[in-house]
Image (cartoon, helix red, strand yellow):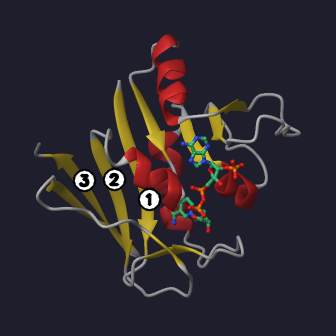
Amino acid sequence: MKKIIISAVAQNGVIGKSSGEIPWHSREEFQHFKNTTSGFPVIMGRKTFDTLGKPLKNRLNIVLTRNKKLILAFTEIVILDSLHSAYKYCESKDYEKIFVIGGTDIYKQAMNTADELLISYMKFNAEGDVFFPEIDLKIWEVKRIDGRNEFDIYTYVRKI
Ligand SMILES: NC(=O)c1ccc[n+]([C@@H]2O[C@H](COP(=O)([O-])OP(=O)(O)OC[C@H]3O[C@@H](n4cnc5c(N)ncnc54)[C@H](OP(=O)(O)O)[C@@H]3O)[C@@H](O)[C@H]2O)c1
């Protein structure tokens, strides 16, 4: 099962605001995210789920929390207590790939085990205080770049 980190990153590295507000709206990037992830599980941290407010359609939504008492109003969401259990759960359902969709806390942990990074580098700076973790080029190499109007999509694969 291929584990893919997907993110949209502004030129200054910003991916979000700790207040939960989303710092930009790009219909083009949203469409890319939707097309890429539809039909596959999306794994996210509880804070990212809070910013979304509802599950993403046509995808198995897995929310990670350490809060054993967390209850969400959406019964279709799978709530788990570690990345490892999320991977095991998806493996048991025979998914060919899964997407780790953020935020920073979850990205940092998933970088160690991910097979691929799919990063939309937006062509603008954004206001915010949540950043994508550093991509170590000793570990990752760029396999492909796809240009779009508002962003370039970099696919990184693991060297080691
Ligand atoms: N631009 C993008 O592509 C993009 C994508 C996603 C998110 N974002 C932004 O990122 C920000 C949120 O990121 P964040 O780093 O603050 O939070 P986050 O990663 O979304 O969520 C962190 C929470 O996940 C849970 N968690 C973390 N590690 C866990 C583990 N190993 N096992 C179980 N649960 C675990 C904890 O929830 P509990 O506190 O409930 O225990 C923790 O507080 C928002 O601003 C959002 O808009 C941007």
Q: Decide which of tag 3 and tag 2 comes sooner along the chain.
A: 2
Mark-to-mark CA distance, 2 and 1: 7 Å
Q: Please, what secondary structure does the residue beneath circle 2 have?
A: strand
Residue at the (19%, 46%) spot, across then down: 157
Q: Please, what secondary structure does the residue beneath circle 3 have?
A: strand
Q: Considering only vertical position in the picture, is 63 above or below 84?
A: below
| Disc 1 residue type (three-letter) | Ser
Cβ of mark 1 under 8 A from ligand 1: yes
Please state the horizontal and vertical placement of residue 74, each as a whole percent of the image: 84, 36
Q: Is residue 41 left or right of residue 141?
A: right
Q: Is residue 27 left or right of residue 13?
A: right
Mark-to-mark CA distance, 3 and 1: 11 Å
Can you name the residue that lies furthest to the right here? 73
Tag of residue 118: 2
Residue at the (50%, 11%) spot, across then down: 92
Tag of residue 7: 1
Q: Nearer the viewer, residue 112 or 37?
A: 112
Q: Are marks 2 and 1 in contact (CB under 8 Å)?
A: yes
Q: Please, what secondary structure does the residue beneath circle 1 have?
A: strand
Q: Is residue 89 left or right of residue 70?
A: left
Residue under numbered circle 3: 155
